[in-house]
Image (spheres, grey):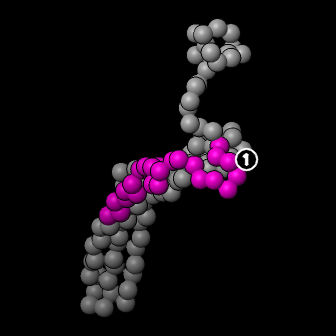
Amino acid sequence: MQPNPGGGANNPNLITNSGLAQPLVGQFGTLGRNVLRLNPLIEFDPALSRQFAIREHLKLKLQAQVFNIFNNTTFSLPGVSLSSPSTFGDYSGTDTNSRRIALTGRLTW
């Protein structure tokens, strides 16, 4: 019988044989390679442009670019430092920017 400091056999906080123990110094753990699956990097950056001829050598080009138009978020790697357990496994940043729109005009002569 295992000792249970939480009080009784019905303690929900008791985790037995969980396999979450830190391996000994100089030893590898049992977690497999590439088991952490992250969201794929998905970005769609369309551009729309139109060129207007004002005179023979004078042209105006208008362009609209939208970056990450569907506003997909790709999280960066989670915290992996065992020295700060409060951030271990938490996502703290993103690898993609939010949706941005750029409007440009170019006059060439």
Q: Secondary structure at mark 1?
A: loop
On screen, residue 1 versus residue 75, left or right, reads: right
> In which quadrant of the rendered image does the N terminus lie?
top right
Residue type (three-letter) at the residue carrying disc 1: Ser
Q: Nearer the viewer, residue 11 or 46?
A: 11
Residue 35 covered by magenta stretch? yes
**Image quarter for residue 84?**
top right
* Place of residue 30 in the rendered image (x, y in percent of width and height, measured from the top left): 53, 47
Residue 72 covered by magenta stretch? no
- Residue drawn 26% across the image and 82% down it: 53
> In which quadrant of the rendered image does the C terminus lie?
bottom left
Q: Which residues are magenta?
A: 22-46
Can residue 23 be seen here? The reply is yes
* Place of residue 85 in the rendered image (x, y in percent of width and height, measured from the top left): 69, 40
* Place of residue 27 in the rendered image (x, y in percent of width and height, measured from the top left): 63, 53
- Check disc 1 and report the residue beneath it: 83
